[in-house]
Amino acid sequence: MESNMGVMPIVLELNAGSFVVHAALFWDEKDVILVDTGIPGHGKLIKETLNRESNLFDRLTKIIITHHDNDHIGSLPELLAESNNRIEVLAHPLAKPYIMGELPLMKGGHMARPAKVDYTVQDGEVLPYCGGIQVVYTPGHMPDHISLYHLPSKTLISGDALTAQEGVLMPPSAQFTIDMDQALQSVAKLAELDIETVIAYHGGVCKDQIRERLAVIAEGAGRT
């Protein structure tokens, strides 16, 4: 079964201005999977954007959350409501109580609007969707952070474990990373994978010198 991948830029509007994030998509004849959901209030925008691409929202079967920061889980309850709760939600076990509104968010301290988590994923698990998606536990930016490695395309969805600037792979943001030493250890773990493309939530797609940049970042050079 042929699988496809794509990137959906989402312009998030805040009082202080707007910024763009890059949500990853996987799809095949059976599943459509969205990774992360932006800040609250953008559910309808995401739905409309997905439906411009072959009615992908109407076919959306799963949402995978990389970690519980508000700009990754914010519109999840809205997307579930728009789908009449038919979409399955996957996340790391450490993310689950934050997503479900049982614990206040680690950043900001407020309670997220509750959403369900149907399935918790483990490090090294290969999800049997869209040709195979390997879960890579990458703590540091946040304790519950996961990245996703799409086996057929050798593409890494890095969440916030990495960033990008104009097509160049960059370290995680020091300003928003809870434990930078642990985050760099996670980058070293990612460097062991055969990666050809990286989709960074903040920064977009990188294809050049991936192996070299991962090695430099893992050594702690060029921290942001």
Image: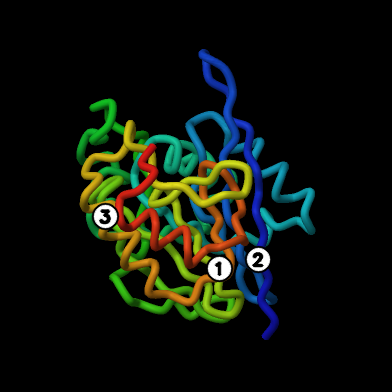
Task: Estimate the spatial distance between the alpha carbons at disc 1 and disc 3, rounded to whole Å.
Answer: 19 Å
Closer mark to the observer between disc 2 and disc 3:
3
Crowd class of label 1 (few under 14; some 14 to 19; many from 20; radius 10 Å): many
Closest to the observer, 172 or 32: 172
The mark nearer the N terminus, 1 or 3, is: 3
Looking at the image, do the residues carrying marks 2 and 3 touch, with CB atoms under 8 Å apart? no
- Residue at (44%, 51%) from the top-left corner? 159
Left or right, 86 with respect to 134, comes to right
Closest to the observer, 103 or 177: 177
- Residue at (61%, 65%) from the top-left corner? 26
Amino acid identity at mark 3? Pro
Any mark on residue 155, and which?
1
- Residue at (35%, 77%) from the top-left corner? 125
Task: Estimate the spatial distance between the alpha carbons at disc 2 and disc 3, rounded to whole Å.
Answer: 25 Å
Closest to the observer, 8 or 98: 8
Vertical position of residue 3 compared to residue 113: above or below: below
Crowd class of label 3 (few under 14; some 14 to 19; many from 20; radius 10 Å): many
- The residue wearing badge 3 is 139
Looking at the image, do the residues carrying marks 1 and 2 touch, with CB atoms under 8 Å apart? yes
Question: Residue 102: percent from the left, percent from the top?
Answer: 22, 41
Left or right, 136 with respect to 94, comes to right
Amino acid identity at mark 1? Thr
Q: Secondary structure at mark 1?
A: strand
- The residue wearing badge 2 is 5
